[in-house]
Image: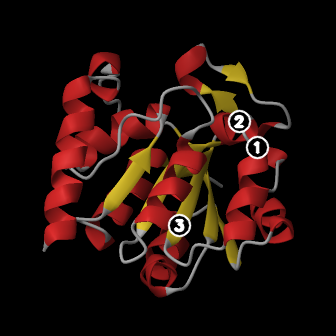
Amino acid sequence: MTIKRDKALKVLAQHYPNGIVVPVYQAAFDWMGIRPHPLNYLCTGAMGQGSSHALGLALACPQERIVVLDGDGSLLMNLGSLVTIGNQGPPNLLHIVCQNGIYEVNGEFPVPGGTEVDFASMALAAGYREAHAFSDLDSWARSLPDILESSGPILVGLKVTVGEPYPRDYPAIHSEEARECFRSALAARRAD
């Protein structure tokens, strides 16, 4: 059983309409279409860096919930971040891994281990306070409000498949404009 990624992200948008989100690659393209917002941090750069950037934001903004929308291929490029996040223990970090077993935006090549990699167990072993795995939309929707209220770091593994197609706007996710929009929105938020 799997969840259409866009449906899973729409549930997140309903429960987390105005917070800081670090979306990477295909999740970023979907997220930009589902929840366009100035607090979407779209400038992670190289594959695998989303979790590290989210950790930096979580440590710098302890009063804010930080959500990272990672991919399985992306996280595999930087598995060491699990240990660093576990060691730092940011209570405001929610790490969501969209697991589809492929490097979707890079030619749909298979990810080592496919969909059998157990990121939730890895996260717990690395020191995360909590970890969950979901493969059906109803369970995800029922559990998300409590997860958002829980102290982190928390990892959620979502077994997903492709949902509604969203444009792959690479210039937008790598643009100076996106970085400046985020900086300005974060500065305004912190000034309140």
Q: Quadrant of residue 121?
A: bottom right
Residue 94 circle label: 3
Q: Secondary structure at mark 1?
A: helix
Q: Are marks 2 and 1 in contact (CB under 8 Å)?
A: yes
Identified at 60% across, 52% down, the residue is: 97
Residue 75 image position (x, y, % from top left)? 68, 42
**Residue 190 appears anywhere in the view:** yes
Q: Are marks 1 and 3 in contact (CB under 8 Å)?
A: no
Residue type beneath disc 3: Leu
Give the side of residue 100 with respect to residue 12, left or right.
right
The residue pinned by badge 1 equals 115
Front residue (pair 50, 103): 50
Q: Amino acid at mark 1?
A: Thr
First in sequence: mark 3 vs mark 2 = 3
On-image quarter of the N terminus: bottom right
> Depth check: 12 or 89 in front?
89
Badge 2 marks a residue whose secondary structure is: loop
Q: Position of residue 138 (x, y in %)?
A: 48, 72
User: What is the spatial separation of the Cα atoms under label 2 and label 1, in whole angstroms?
Assistant: 5 Å
For residue 83, side relative to residue 182 (left or right): right
Identify the residue at image location x=46%, y=35%. Answer: 44
Q: Residues within 10 Å of mark 2 (few under 14, many from 20)?
A: many
Q: Nearer the viewer, mark 3 or mark 2?
A: 3
List the residue tagged with mark 2: 101
- How crowded is the residue under tag 3: few (<14 C-alpha within 10 Å), some, or many (20+)? many
Comparing marks 1 and 3, which lies closer to the viewer?
Answer: 3
As displayed, is residue 139 above or below residue 24? below
Residue 36 can be seen in this image: no
